[in-house]
Image (cartoon, coloured by chain):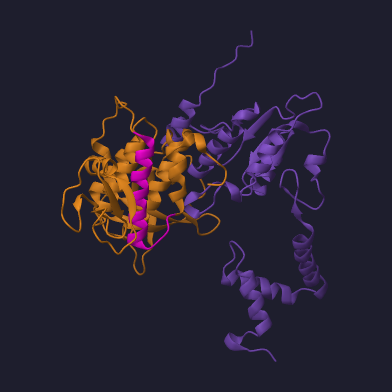
Chain colours: A orange, B purple
Amino acid sequence: MVDYSETSQVVTLLTRNHGLVPALAKGVRKLAVRSASAFGGPLDLLAEGDVVFLPPRSGELATLTAWGVLNHQAAMRRDLAAFYAGQISCEFTIALLSPHDPHPELFDQITAAVGRFHTAQRGLALVAYLKCALAAAGYQARLEACCVCGQAVRPGARVRFIPAMGAVACDSCPIHSPTIPVQSAVILALHRLVPPAQLPHRPPDKPADAAALLLAANLLVSQCQATTDRRLRTAGLLELFFRPREMRADI
Amino acid sequence: MGNTRGGYSTAVRHLMELLGRLPGVGSRSAERMVFHILKGSADDALALARAIEAVKTQVRHCSICYHLTESDPCEICADPSRDQTLICVVEQPKDLFQIESTGAFHGVYHVLLGHLAPLDGILPGDLTIDALVARATEKSPDASPRIKEIILATNPTMDGDGTALYLQQQLADTGVTITRLARGMPAGGQIEHANKAILSDAISGRTRIQSSQ
């Protein structure tokens, strides 16, 4: 969301049927109290709602004509970790998707993930969403076997993740791109990780290993950055999200 | 002689361009302002120029609360009649002016000079959070905390709420009471016409009615 004038903003909407829609929202900064007004409720980061917009006549900017909020993410507004996860998810999505390219399945997954960001499943939900977003954009990570020799990733082995390829390689296979050494257990767990919508709502019997989740999230973020050739501003929030007790002001 | 491209001299065009960069001022408004200045007296025009120069050279941030001021500390921080144990934290000086205009707050302020916005690259180090934490940890001569309450009056947007959560975490060990501005139904509003976000905030933020007996 970027301020356009005293009362208007340029916003990026993620819609189920039209994908990312950059739009001009005239008058949206004057918060509407009445549900009957054109902007009934806050148009804010990760808020869910019904939207009406006019497609762009030229250029990319649509015109938002109506917005009705369905969920303004009250739980996320009371949870710092959920706030961090929301920021990371937003930037990741915007970095990967092109405007006006619909991905209904990803819309459903981010909705499911956001709904879990304030629960005990938050870490799994974030990593699962990052994996889904890469797959939806056509960059599904190949994690089951070495991309050079084709040998299956074995438990206990040490492998390397190749961000630019979104693939893994054996420790001994020749790779000319930068790689990140990682235990195969992390890669195999990431490979098995189901999409956010399939994660159970109840707390897991055994809490997920925060260090392994952080490493997995960093692998996916490095793949996103290598693929899009763009540094994610929210990448530094991962550390705070997975290690909240080590929070520092210099994030 | 200035360039007269578009019918305007270079000086006129330059002033129109500069005025057009002001918020809420388009090219037509800038044009009207320039003609107004040209039509008025030279004294008025020069007074305007000097006033602009003065605010840029004389107005700075208060070293205590970061409000805009010509004297340091600012009038509010230096006012002994204000409750110095109560700090209201706002995002911008214009938010401070709004709260002051209500006449309902008699404590002092702390201006963050923005809010956390990781997507825009604005992180805690870009705000005056360290100075706020330092104020909150100051001790009185008898070693008790000098500040008793900090009101987080950041905007109720996602970024404003995130900033408040971050401040709450940073201030948790200071022993100072941390409060947040109330949110929900505005005075004079009607439930029938309120949007869902406001109603949901009002219900979750409901308060107990104190009995007068």
Does residue A71 appear to the left or right of B33 in the view shown?
left
Q: Is residue B198 above or below residue A163?
A: above
Taking the spot 19% from the left edge, 59% from the top edge, the residue there is A148
**Magenta-drawn stretch contains B186:** no
Taking the spot 79% from the left edge, 33% from the top edge, the residue there is B82
Q: What main secondary structure does the magenta stretch of the protein show? A: helix
Residues shaded magenta: A209-232
| Closer to the camera in the image, B46 or A10 | A10
| Closer to the camera in the image, B208 or B116 | B116
Does residue A199 appear to the left or right of B158 in the view shown?
left
User: Which quarter of the picture shows residue B209?
Assistant: top right
| Closer to the camera in the image, B148 or B10 | B148
Taking the spot 82% from the left edge, 50% from the top edge, the residue there is B71
- Horizontal and vertical percent position of residue A92: 37, 52
Q: Is residue A216 above or below residue B198?
A: below
Residue A52 appears in the picture as rendered? no
| Closer to the camera in the image, B205 or B162 | B162
**Magenta-drawn stretch contains A215:** yes
How many marks on residues? Answer: 0
- Horizontal and vertical percent position of residue A226: 35, 60
Does residue B138 appear to the left or right of A111 in the view shown?
right
- Horizontal and vertical percent position of residue A144: 19, 48
Taking the spot 47% from the left edge, 41% from the top edge, the residue there is A240
